[in-house]
Image: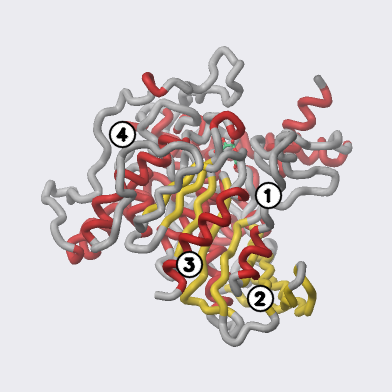
């Protein structure tokens, strides 16, 4: 029992519970103490936000454990009590959006404002500048290919509040023999602490192809940004990191940005750097992430039009999944003290007194903010990955995002019928594919890269 709870603790502290099944050691006393204190600070911050929202309590979300008495619903027949989604092509004043101009000038800003205020939070006007330092440049081999790897640190100017130091960790690798600037895929990456490893693939599964080598084989580069280097993945960290820095170490206001928006901000600052690096074709920088970082990858795409393509891995609730669906993870889970920090404080209201049906927006409209750029929605197999992420909920968001893409002269998913496993819907500017593996983007990389190829020459 003791050992099990320690594993859960490490999950909360450092990485996701979903990725944590293979945590390999107990916490040291120092880690335990850090956890206890972080949990206290998180609960306090959560309470402070509830008070600001005049909320006494929220509804509890279902359990991610399918065996638990309060397990999340995994029965499609019970998934759709909500009948209507917000229409991305109807203005607040009830008028229909019939032209791209109306979309860009009127409707898109309305949707952005709703996501800003109620879901992901606003990036403050006073976010300090980032100064990029190339810490090292190394010529090395990745497999057969000679590469140049740069380690970078983005120093966030903290002159307004010197007691907080915030740096963005970034690594960039490009082929050494490239004849010019190359396209780059940037991953929002997890960091596993010493003694912990990512979950091993189930016995008998093929080893995953190495995504970095696949990119190099195409002549592309890759980058990894560490979101938790500049904004912690817990509520206790909201008075620190870049969010804390802009608030002088004070708790957030209800419409201030949450961690997803902060992580996306960091990805944009990395792209600022790429624009200055001659090795990178900055017009061909894509973004990839899994799970919470899949959510962050989609938020990055939605808010920064410079990213040319998104590979959105198992992003689930708070990412590409329709929130008006009773299947897998629910708004009530996202709004609890373990995950509320990903969002604006205002989002908590939708777990009490409001309901998901009161949200002014839903996930299909987040995809629409990426339009007309290509978005590849990736998910694993429910039998391996589980039902928590809600594959069909993400597919449906892709379907309902379609009309905006079409209005902008692009192609939608092409069908409203959920495709069989390993059958990519790849003809449109919104793509979807369910691979046969677990909670990973790994097996979808070859398909994604084939898809991305179409766009890399335009
Ligand atoms: C939890 C959480 C998900 C999240 C995932 C992850 O399962 O409920 O919303 O995507 O962790 O980031 O691994």
Which image quarter is the N terminus in?
top right
Most distant residue in the top direction = 69
Q: Nearer the viewer, mark 3 or mark 2?
A: 3
Q: CA distance from mark 4 to mark 2?
A: 46 Å
Q: CA distance from mark 3 to mark 2?
A: 17 Å
Local SS, label 1:
loop
On the image, numbered disc 1 is attached to which residue?
208
Q: Nearer the viewer, mark 4 or mark 2?
A: 2
On the image, numbered disc 4 is attached to which residue?
358
Task: Pick the residue in front: 10 or 398.
Answer: 398
Q: Nearer the viewer, mark 1 or mark 2?
A: 1
Task: Pick the residue in front: 429 or 33.
Answer: 429
Up-down: is 428 above or below 79? Answer: below
Indicate which disc, 4 or 2, sits on the residue closer to the N terminus: 2
Local SS, label 2:
strand
Marks 1,3: beta carbons within 8 A: no
Which residue is located at x 68 percent, y 39 percent?
19
Neighbour tally class for label 4: few under 14, some 14-19, many 20 plus, Cα within 10 Å? few
Up-down: is 4 above or below 122? Answer: above
Q: Nearer the viewer, mark 4 or mark 1?
A: 1
Up-down: is 401 above or below 356? Answer: below
Q: Nearer the viewer, mark 4 or mark 3?
A: 3
Query: Which numbered dot is residue 264?
Result: none
Query: Which numbered dot is residue 453?
Result: 3
Indicate which disc, 3 or 2, sits on the residue closer to the N terminus: 2
Neighbour tally class for label 1: few under 14, some 14-19, many 20 plus, Cα within 10 Å? some
Which image quarter is the C terminus in?
bottom left
Local SS, label 3:
helix
On the image, numbered disc 2 is attached to which residue?
174
Which residue is located at x 40 percent, y 39 percent?
419
């Amino acid at each position: 029992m003791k050992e099990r709870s320690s594993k859960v603790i490490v999950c909360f502290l450092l990485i996701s519970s979903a990725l944590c099944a293979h945590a390999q050691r107990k916490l040291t006393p120092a880690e335990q103490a850090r956890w206890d204190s972080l949990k206290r600070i998180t609960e306090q911050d959560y309470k402070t936000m509830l008070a600001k929202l005049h909320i006494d309590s929220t509804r509890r979300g279902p359990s991610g454990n399918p065996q638990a008495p309060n397990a999340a619903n995994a029965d499609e027949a019970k998934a759709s009590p909500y009948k209507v989604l917000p229409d991305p092509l109807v203005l607040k004043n009830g008028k229909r959006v019939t032209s791209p101009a109306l979309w860009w000038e009127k409707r898109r800003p309305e949707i952005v404002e709703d996501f800003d205020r109620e879901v992901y939070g606003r990036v403050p006007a006073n976010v300090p500048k980032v100064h990029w330092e190339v810490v090292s440049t190394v010529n090395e081999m990745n497999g057969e290919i000679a590469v140049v790897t740069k380690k970078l640190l983005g120093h966030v100017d903290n002159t307004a509040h010197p007691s907080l130091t915030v740096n963005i960790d970034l690594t960039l690798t490009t082929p050494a023999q490239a004849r010019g600037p190359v396209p780059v895929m940037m991953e929002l990456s997890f960091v596993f602490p010493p003694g912990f490893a990512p979950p091993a693939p189930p016995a008998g599964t093929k080893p995953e192809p190495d995504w970095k080598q696949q990119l190099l084989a195409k002549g592309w580069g890759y980058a990894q940004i560490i979101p938790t280097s500049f904004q912690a993945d817990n509520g206790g960290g909201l008075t620190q990191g870049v969010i804390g820095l802009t608030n002088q170490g004070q708790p957030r206001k209800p419409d201030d940005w949450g961690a997803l928006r902060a992580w996306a901000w960091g990805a944009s600052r990395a792209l600022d750097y790429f624009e200055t690096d001659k090795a990178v074709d900055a017009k061909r920088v894509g973004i990839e992430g899994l799970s919470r970082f899949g959510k962050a990858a989609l938020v990055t795409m939605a808010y920064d039009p410079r990213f040319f393509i998104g590979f959105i891995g198992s992003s689930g609730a708070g990412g590409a999944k329709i929130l008006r669906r009773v299947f897998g993870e629910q708004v009530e889970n996202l709004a609890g003290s373990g995950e509320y920090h990903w969002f604006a404080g205002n989002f908590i209201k939708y777990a009490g007194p409001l309901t998901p049906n009161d949200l002014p927006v839903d996930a299909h409209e987040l995809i629409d903010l990426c339009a007309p750029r290509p978005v590849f929605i990736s998910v694993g197999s429910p039998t391996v990955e589980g039902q928590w992420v809600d594959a069909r909920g993400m597919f449906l968001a892709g379907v309902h995002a379609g009309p905006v893409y079409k209005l902008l002269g692009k192609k939608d998913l092409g069908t409203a019928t959920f495709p069989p496993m390993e059958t990519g819907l790849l003809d449109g500017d919104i793509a979807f594919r369910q691979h046969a593996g677990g909670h990973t983007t790994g097996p979808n990389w070859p398909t994604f890269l084939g898809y991305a190829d179409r766009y890399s020459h335009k």
